[in-house]
Structures are given as C-alpha cells and as structure tokens.
C-alpha cells in the first residue's frame, strides 16, 4: 500500500510542453507513472511523443479530467502563473495537486491553499517541493526513481535534497511512499498530514521525518506524534549552524529570536520519544536499527 499516490493514479501534467515539464514527464513515464495527459491551452488537440509514448495535450484541466479520469496533477509552470494553474485544478476537483514550482509568492499560495481547503476535495503538495513517489508504482514530481525501491519505511521531508539522500541511505530497506512537502512558509500538506497517513497505512512500519529551521511545524508534529502515532519515528532537523535572521535555502527556513531553532525542534521531538540524528547518515542508521529490530 502507499499514501496519496498509487499504481492506479492517473496523472496529468500542467506545463508538460515546457522545458522542465517535458524533461520530468519523460522521467516520470520511464519510472512507470501512468501519465494520461498534459495541459496547455495553446497546444490543445495535439500530442507529445515521449520516447515512443504519445501523450495528449488538453486545453483545460477540466477537459483532461473529463476525457481521462485524471486524479493527480503535477504542475510545472512559472511562479506568476502558478496560482491560476492550481485554482484551475481545484475547480476541476482534482484530488491531488503536486506543485513543483519554486518562488511562488506566499500570498498566492495562501489563496490557492484556502481554495483547496474550501473545496473539500483537493490535497495540495508543495509548492517548492520535489513531489511524491511510491517506488515501483508511481512518481509525481522530480524525485529520481532510481534512488530506492519499494519497502516499508515512510518518509516526509521539507527538503528535496535530503529526501534524495535519505532514500539513498536507506535503499537497502526501501520505502512505502516518500513525500517532499516543501519548505515555504505555507505548504499544502504538512508533516502532520503525512504522519497521520503513514500511521494509518498498514504497509508502513516506521517513519522518517526531516525538518529544518524556521516556524513551528516540527514542534507541532512532535505534539501530534505524542498523541496519535504508535509507529517508530526518527527525525533529522537541518540548520544547526544557521545564523539568526538569515534565510537558509527555503523561504521559510529562517530563525527569528528564539523561535524556530534546530535545537528547539530536536528537543521537542526527543521529548516525545523520537530519536533525532545529528546528521542525515546518523538518522538513517537510527532507522536501520529500528527496521532490523522489527524484522527479528
């Protein structure tokens, strides 16, 4: 099993005919993703060949959903067009919308996140994220499919790069699903959302949670874990050496006063029984030890 994305997911790509959309659609198809269409109003009615696979281009998301039954959209459009693209997917009642685009204004994210919540039908992952992969089944985004195969570890991470590293470090065990939620101040899917889904997934035995400085998402996740998660969780928090007041990497990764420090997040997680590694490799080793014990 998996969370949010399965082998039965029917995926469309908004911005499929652009350079990034074309490149990553090729990669998603190669990894087995069932891509049923693309969206570009100027190229409606045409098709694009991806190494022998022909994918139809539709003028609107609604048309694509009507013709293909698509239930996932991956968005590769420039920041200034992202809000409209997401709102179009929400209006078409696409259940899962994965927003890869970096540099989306926070005001725009707030608008389309509010619309998705009001719809009651659409979950957003991102923006500014690598997407989601259920190894061997489907890959919606830019996560390299060759890093790790299927297994029983769930991974949720703010960082794309650390998602890749953790999947590589634990490739001997594999993953049920790995999800990069993005590091912007507002994201559509939170650590808590993923933790709940992994807790409910019978094919996930343990969870890796990767956070970073800024905000209080990790502290809130710690409180949630204490009350709701019975599966073992290990964590990593990026940014122990980050200087105060300087944004590090992600738009939301900034320490302000005593708020949002890596040390405070580590302390909150450890207080509820989450083992937190000092490095990604140490974190992977903590999970490896848990998986080995579960296999006994």
Image (tube, rainbow, N blue to C red):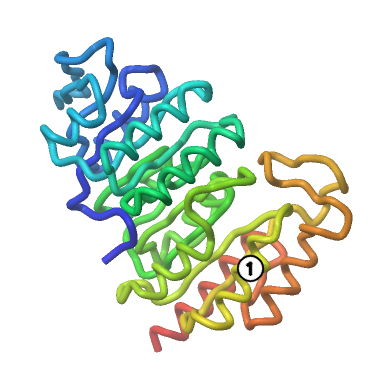
Pick whichever, 53 or 188, lies toward us: 188
Q: Specify the farthest residue to the bottom.
A: 296
Q: Specify the farthest residue to the left.
A: 67
Residue shown at the point (28%, 43%) measured from the top left: 94
Pick whichever, 95 or 165, lies toward us: 95
In this rendering, position of residue 246 left or right of residue 277 = right
Q: Which residue is mark 1?
A: 220
Up the image or down, 77 lies above or below 129; here it is above
Coordinates of residue 285 in the picture (x, y in percent): 58, 70
Up the image or down, 22 lies above or below 186; here it is above
Q: Secondary structure at mark 1?
A: helix
Residue shown at the point (34%, 40%) measured from the top left: 90
In this rendering, position of residue 23 left or right of residue 266 = left
Pick whichever, 28 or 44, lies toward us: 44
Coordinates of residue 76 in the picture (x, y in percent): 41, 28
Coordinates of residue 145 in the picture (x, y in percent): 36, 45
Q: Specify the farthest residue to the top.
A: 42
In which quarter of the view is residue 63 placed? top left
- Quadrant housing the N terminus: bottom left
Pick whichever, 227 or 135, lies toward us: 227
Up the image or down, 218 lies above or below 286; here it is above
Coordinates of residue 287 in the picture (x, y in percent): 53, 72
- Count the numbered circles shown: 1
Up the image or down, 250 lies above or below 179; here it is above
Residue shown at the point (32%, 61%) measured from the top left: 150
In this rendering, position of residue 223 left or right of residue 57 = right
Residue shown at the point (84%, 51%) measured from the top left: 256
- Quadrant housing the C terminus: bottom left
The residue carrying pointer 1 sits among few (fewer than 14), some (14 to 19) or many (20 or more) residues within 10 Å by Cα, namely some
């Amino acid at each position: 099993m998996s969370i949010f994305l399965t082998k039965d997911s029917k995926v469309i790509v908004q911005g499929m005919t652009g350079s990034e959309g074309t490149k990553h659609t090729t990669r998603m198809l190669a990894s087995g993703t069932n891509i049923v269409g693309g969206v570009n109003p100027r190229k409606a009615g045409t098709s694009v060949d991806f190494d022998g696979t022909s994918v139809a281009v539709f003028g609107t998301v609604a048309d694509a959903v009507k013709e293909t039954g698509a239930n996932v959209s991956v968005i590769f459009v420039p920041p200034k067009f992202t809000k409209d693209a997401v709102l179009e997917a929400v209006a078409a009642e696409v259940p899962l919308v994965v927003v890869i685009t970096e540099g989306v204004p926070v005001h725009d994210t707030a608008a389309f996140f509010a619309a998705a919540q009001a719809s009651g039908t659409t979950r957003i992952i991102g923006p500014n994220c690598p997407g989601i992969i259920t190894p061997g089944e489907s890959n919606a985004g830019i996560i390299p499919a060759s890093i790790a195969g299927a297994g029983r570890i769930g991974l949720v991470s703010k960082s794309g790069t650390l998602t890749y590293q953790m999947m590589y470090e634990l490739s001997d065990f594999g993953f049920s699903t790995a999800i990069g939620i993005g590091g912007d101040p507002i994201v559509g899917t939170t650590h808590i959302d993923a933790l709940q889904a992994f807790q409910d997934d019978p094919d996930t035995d343990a969870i890796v949670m990767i956070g970073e400085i800024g905000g209080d998402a990790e502290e809130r996740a710690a409180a949630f874990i204490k009350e709701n998660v019975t599966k073992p969780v290990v964590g990593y928090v990026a940014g122990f050496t980050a200087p105060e007041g300087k944004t590090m990497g992600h738009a939301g990764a900034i320490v302000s006063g005593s708020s949002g420090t890596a040390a405070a997040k580590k302390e909150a997680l450890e207080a509820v029984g989450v083992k937190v590694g000092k490095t990604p490799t140490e974190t992977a080793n903590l999970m490896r030890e848990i998986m080995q014990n579960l296999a006994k």
